[in-house]
Image: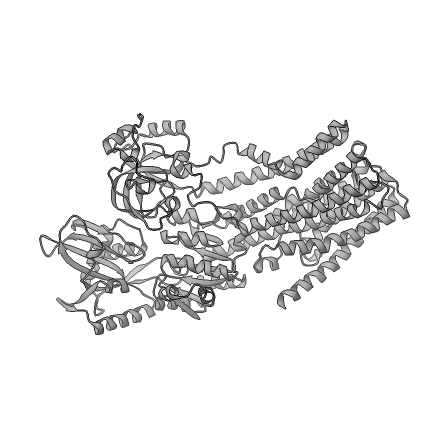
Amino acid sequence: MAEPVSSPVWALDQPALLKAFGSSENGLSDAEAASRLAADGPNSLEDENRHRALRLLLRQVESPMVLVLLFGAGLAMTLREWSDAIIIVTVVAASALLGFSQEYKASTALLELKKRLALSAKVRRGGAVETVPAVTIVKGDIVELAAGNLVPADGVVLKASDFLVSEATLTGESMPVEKRPGTSAPEAPLAKRLNCVFGGTSVRSGTASVLITATGRATEVGNVARMITGAEGETEFARGIKHFGYLLIRVMIVMVLFVLITSQLLHRPLIESLLFAVALAIGMTPELLPAIVTVTLSTGARAMAKEGVIVRRLEALENLGSINILCTDKTGTLTEGAVRVDAAVDCRGAADDAVLRLAVTNAALETGIDNPMDQALLEAGKARGISGEGAKKLDEIPYDFTRKRLTIVIESPATPGKALMITKGSFATILAVCGSWRDGKTVVPLDKAGRAALSAYLDQQCGQGFRLLALATKEAEIKPDYTLADENDMVLEGFLLFADPPKAEARAAIASLAALGISLKVISGDNAPVTRHVADALGIPSGQLLTGPEIAAAPPDALPVMVEKATLFAEIDPQQKERIITALQKRGHAVGYMGDGINDAPALRAADIGISVDTAVDVARQTADIILLKRDLNVLRMGVESGRRTFANTMKYISMTTSANFGNMLSMALATPLLPFLPLLAKQILLNNFLSDLPSMAIAGDNVDAERISGVQRWSIRDVQRFMLVFGPLSSVFDLITFAVLLYGFTAREAEFQTAWFTVSLLTEVVIVLVLRTRKPAWQSRPGNALLLLSAAVAGLALGLPYIPLVARLFGFVPLPLSVLGVLVLIAVAYVLTTEIAKALYYSWLSRRSTA
């Protein structure tokens, strides 16, 4: 069992540390780990299952509008208006339960999807290394970490080899920090605890064994209350919803004050007027919007999961449908990703097994980042009977994305008592540290003419689509530690040629993305000839190509224009990927970025939508918004279509409900000073609003016209406002016609007028959804079955409620004469036909405006 810790964990030596946490070099037993998990809880910053149902239920009644309604109910109780109070509470409860049931179902489905992407970690239990979910890690566990892993919890390093960790999420330091076993001073600040790792940071290179000392909320990242990738940015859609809310509040304030002041000037009862004004405000609000958005998004997420696309952050799903530029690497996305060694050659281009032997030794002894090229080298060596066995490793200088090379130091097989440095990496960075090259058994100085000849060979091979690595060696004295300064005056031994052919289906996928209005930009670390060769093979317009050095030299104000014009980017450093993304965003583009490596995390975060694959390194998967179960642009295309479908259905609800509610509330506000009574009672407004929202719950599964999917969709509060101001007042025109017919044609009294107005208002609100849900004529676009059935059911209720005695008595309805019902139906039909004509004119005007 663990013992009380008297000193900071980073100041304890290993024996004391293991004793303090009741662990050993073999780790905990499974039974002990299970016991500690039960006692301390999961290794998570937030237990998503705890009180989830209660939180969702409270969310339904926490909006200011609902609180105002409950205030009105309390006011009615105080004045002993029991029927009004009961009706208000009942409608609020029904709306809350409806929203809760839908959101609970949606959140449950989302949790199931997230479980498929849960982090795992390698833990030593009982002396054996096993892979377990990261949430089950406990204090005292020994975790094995390697390049690309996210550190699952806080811990102290027991063993390490070339172990570099990026701590930017905690310290803001952009450069990786080397972690070693040992102790740190008790007073050392977080950034100086060089024997510690912290949850949420990422391993850049090397390997380590770490004793876990804190989990969940007890970690450093838990103490500052932020997730591993920092605070999630607000999506464009979320910002749009917020501005939409501000618009509604402004409209409601004007309407409520107008109605309240007018009612008092007409000497109407204060309480009745106040309840009417409050109900009017509520009627203007699409109070089921949070539930509708959640249900629509989760429905889209489940549909995408069936296509092999997992949504990590539900709110970002809207952004997937809005991207008009997709930036991606070529390896594995545009190419097969099955890299193979085509040849190992000497400096003159002749096949040479000695070069392959050196390269295989380097790949076999590397402990840093796993990569397909090393795997291809090992497989090629195995096929030729070559392996790294027998080589005694002395040290390793890990790969980094600045030098673009990696060095393995072994005991020299040719010269006893000497060390042999074997370095492989990109052509330019290897030549930069070489002073000579091997010509057979002779070592020749590498002069300017030799470098030019080698560069010409590089261009020739890359022009044929081969990726090329250079390999160099150097004999050195044996010493305890080797640094970057030792990589100099090396001998160029030869080259490794890798083949990675383009995917057969990539050309069609690129064309289908273009048909969706998404242009592709290829960002590659390879050189220009290789990048252009792949682009030409796949029919990607290769137009302007920018290289890393050109981007580095570009003035900040010129870069956005440069990257917008370019299609291909070659020799790009990891830091430049993020610059390219942000430069495109400055030009007004919504940018998606697809990556799976450690160096892709900044770009994934910067993009409007970050896309990775389930085989990516931990840090990439946890930074991305969307995870593809298959690295295929066709899968991504289906995801984009699903995202656009989700966006379209969400906007249907917002636009249609807001315009209908605005029209009805505008009508009642205008009628208030003209009528000798209120056009509707407060409880009738609430019932109308509740029933008209019922069909909206089915919008999540509504059919979407192909035209809406084929074009890029962006949130625009101006479009919502314009839609509301066109179709809302149009409905008000027919409302005023209805008022005139009821008052002057049928001389309707208060109860009959309110019943007739409730009926026609609800009937038109439901029917008009079927008209405004599509830009085409309503009969050319089939709605979803659920939407159609619910709309028919509510339309039936609109006509039938006044004839149900109990309901009529509760809500103040009276049976309507058939003549009145007939006229109301005729008005509804005329309204529908007029709206169809207005819709055609409206979208025709929008089309002309957008092409002007």
**Residue found at the far bottom of this picture:** 449
Which residue sits at x=18%, y=61%?
Answer: 354
Which residue sits at x=62%, y=51%?
Answer: 651
The quarter of the image holding the C terminus is: bottom right
718 and 755: which is toward the camera: 718
Which residue sits at x=47%, y=68%?
Answer: 565
Residue 798 drawn above or below residue 318: above
Q: Is residue 22 left or right of residue 807?
A: left
Q: Is residue 408 left or right of residue 775?
A: left
The picture places residue 679, in percent across and down from the top left corner, at: 81, 42
Q: Is residue 389 left or right of residue 520?
A: left
The picture places residue 46, in percent across and down from the top left corner, at: 46, 36
Which residue sits at x=16%, y=50%?
Answer: 390
The quarter of the image holding the N terminus is: top left
Residue 825 drawn above or below residue 67: below
Q: Is residue 611 visible?
A: no
